[in-house]
Amino acid sequence: MGMLTNFWLKQYLKQGRLVVVYALVLILAVINAFIYSDRYAQDATEYDRLARAYNDSFQQASASPDGMAGMMFNLPLPQRSLKFMADSKIETVPTIARVMPERVLLPSGSDGTGQNFLGFDAIDFAFIVEVILSFIALVLTYDAICGEKQQGTLKQMLANGVPRRSIFISKILAGVTTLALPLLLGLIVNLVSTQMLGKIPGVGQHYIAYGLFFLFSLLLLLFFVSLGVTVSALTRAPVTSLVVLVLLWALLVVIAPGGVKLVGKVLSPVRSPEEYQRLSDDINQKYMMQGIEAGAMTRPPSMARADNFKGERIFNRFSEQENGERENLAREQLRMLYAQAETIDLLSVLSPSSLYRQAVARLSDNDLPTLQDFFNQGERYQTALFSAMRLADEKDKDSPHLLFMGNAGIGSYLSTKPFGTAPPRFQWEEAPIASRAAQSGPGLLILAAMIAVALLIGAFAFNRYDVR
Amino acid sequence: MWTLIKKESLENILTLRFLIGFVACAALFGITTTVLVNDFKADYEIANAAIREVETQIEEWTVFSRVRPTVIRMPSPLSVFGSKNGARWGTRMLISQTRIPAVASDESGEGQSSNFLGLFRGLDFAEVVQICISLLAILLTFDAISGEKERASLRLILSNPVGRTKLITSKFLGAVIALVPIFVFGFVVALVVFQIFSPVGFSADDWGKTGLLLVLILLYGAAFAAIGLLISAFTHSSATSLAVSMFVWIVIILVIPNAIGLFVSEMGFNEDSRELSRNLDKIAGEHGGPVSELLGSDLPFRDYKAVLFLSSGGPRYEGLIMFRLMGPNAVEFFVSKLPEIIRDQSDYATDRFGFENEFLQRRFDKIALIGNLQRVSPTSVFAHAANAIAGTDVNGYKHFLEETKNYRQELLSYIEGMGGFTSKRWFTDDYPGGPLEDLLQTFETMTAGQQLLYFQTHTQELMDMLPDVIESVENDPRRKLDLSDMPRFEMRPISLYESVSAASFDMLLLVVFIAACLTFSYIRFLHYDVR
């Protein structure tokens, strides 16, 4: 079997057109290294700017709970160093967690429509594997069985006592090896150029990620090689086989991944930002009217002290209710947003190439779970900050303890004395690569199952293949 | 000749590829349109709500410096058939005396759509057409010559009195004719879906543009049929033709458009929005001279913020209260200074426009550069033409900017006609004996001995304490400006003629491309070894 694999491997490598493909892969790998090194540097500058802004406003506000209360912090997501593998275009979605002490945390940020006027996609490494190498996999294997039959060599081999199983498996092994070579070369070239450019720091995790990326990619290529051999065992003429494969390829690689977004949007709708704003305003209006009738008011603290903040306390009560209701609304909105994104994410099981992209995006840590984790951390931070403020405020005997004064008033109704212990600062904790790789597990298992199904069908068809 | 074409097209139509293509196109076009019409409906409703909001604002304005309507670009029904990104770009603009429209108002601020959809790749209608039609066209012609040779039928045909010219022409036309039912049916499905779900129908021009779109799709399909033919004339087995064709297809459809866009934006052609905001801050500091001079003059009022109100328009009652507190001559004094201030503001608008326009031009240049480089690929040529027809390209945005500029002029001459720039109605709606007297008196007793600045910081709080007085001020009809005959923004739709001329260059390019491919295939075919 090893001999057969070797033989076909040499046959494949002898083909002149493969040189073109190898060259293309290497060129794209270098371009990729340049683009993403540059992009990383840009992202890092932007992150530094935002982080400095956060630090500055934190410094300014951390003198007292009163200062903290009027403040709004924008927590930025740090630059992602492995974006080159699968660029989820994370910069075009909300990547800023906005922390205001008395508000629910909602994602915000640019939707990036301005930049994407022409709507092009990224040339990340996953693109090379998913689009170019996967197609080459089909071109290599479309005539694996039916071509041999047409030339009459299949009959000869079987007559010489070569088992069908060996032919089938060695075809697949030879195909995968042929593709593994440019993939490996491309990755090495990419790694070397990235290191030479020196913009992305090479940490230990980085190399593990490269290794895992290679394995994940190999799995996808194995799928396409199996698909090619299977279809060639199901058809009689090479051209038919190739036409079927091309159509399947367009469906799996181009149509399905883009189509699920369309379907997901319909299956799991969300409120538009405008509608959300309207509902939020309605709540505000409702409580404002009720509050005014009940005698709620806000005055400058010097005036309010005269009747011991009576109107402010009523105001506070209504604010608390209003905030509660607004919080529910915001949570519902966030749930819908997550549900929509998760639906689309889930629908990607329809196509092996989406499964692959999803797995690689998990690995490179710039996709939906990254954002969800980021926002969860932001929310935990907000809770911690708020309880620190509450604690400090309660210790101060002179403070009226009016924590829910809403946007306008809150700054003036909390303790102006310094915090006893410093309030917490936001620190983003990155998920370790092992846990990210583990998250890719289920998707890869489904991909493996798809490979198994393709192989089973292929083996079954080949066993009953009429070699005459 | 005609018999040959009929035979070729029938042969194409009777294949499995045709059937799959027919069904797949109809299904994909239908599904895509269903989703996109939903998006369009949402956009349409949002735009309508925004317009209604502007109408309520108009009723609330009491001074002319506050007359700053936001205009909305209504989404065009045809945008469903263009690219999704373009349709969302630049949809609203704030019109004011201090600003000549350049960069759209919805671009500078925080993004409104806080969802995660950007994480996923999507398809719009134009992309579905790009992929489906090109793939089908190539699949119909990739073995036109090499396949016939492989089956040895080419020799047979040529031994009959059929010229090579006739053969290759009929091969090409046969494929194109077979394509027609596929995309026409798919497009009809899309149109039916659109008419069922859309909140607005097509105008006569829109129907014309739809027809133009069909012609464009035909040209696009023909271009790929010609590529397939060319490759089949260069190869000798149908499998090789297919492998080569598909590789070329990937490069044309996926690699070139992506790589060029990415490259140009990486190569430092990016417009820097931070530089723009720095420049804008700088000129904001340079202007306001007349107002600053007032600060130095010998008047009882020296409050900087009070004077600044003239140029910006602060919270609702603040300014009125200021003038009352400043003394009886304050209003007359400011009226006498108004021409100077207005002139300064116009200069500010011109300067600001200079910077914003430069920023915008750099962006347009970048888009034009990307577009021109992308035109190497017929797919991008198609995309540009389709967007030009659907109005979702950069020209649609430019058109919107022009229209808003015209509207601003119209609005300014309206305000001028109403005497807005020369009377005290520019900055105050106060009049002796009005309900404001009560408000002011109440304020004065409540806050005796406070500084002007005090009002500045606590106006809202003071107002919250006096709901009854505020209500009578709000409902006082004499304060309201009568703006019922104010011109409203109405965007002139891009006419069919303009669409045709915008798309004509790209359509011509496609024709040239087809002609070139056919010529090369013909020359190659003349030397083709049929054995």
Image: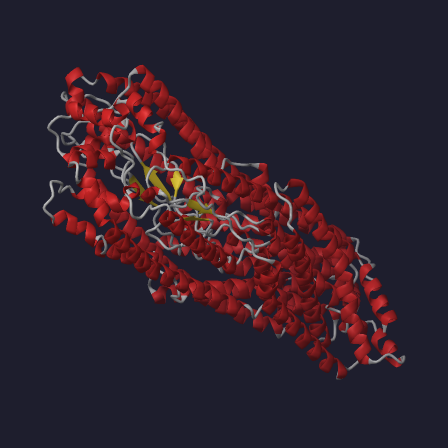
Q: Quadrant of the N terminus of chain B?
A: bottom right
State the residue in front, A368 or A278. A278
Give the left or right position of residue B343, taking residue A417 as reference: right
Q: Is residue A344 above or below residue A49?
A: above
Q: Is residue A3 above or below residue A111?
A: below
Give the left or right position of residue A385, taking residue B159 as reference: left
Q: Which quarter of the figure has residue B344?
A: bottom left
Q: Quadrant of the C terminus of chain B?
A: bottom right
Q: Position of residue B504 (x, y in %)?
A: 61, 67
Q: Position of residue A350 (x, y in %)?
A: 62, 45
Q: Which quarter of the figure has residue A19?
A: bottom right
Residue at the extreme right of the image, as rendered? B160
**Number of marks:** 0
State the residue in front, A407 or B70. B70
Give the left or right position of residue B486, taking residue B392 as reference: left
Q: Position of residue A338 (x, y in %)?
A: 48, 37
Q: Is residue B49 above or below residue B439?
A: below
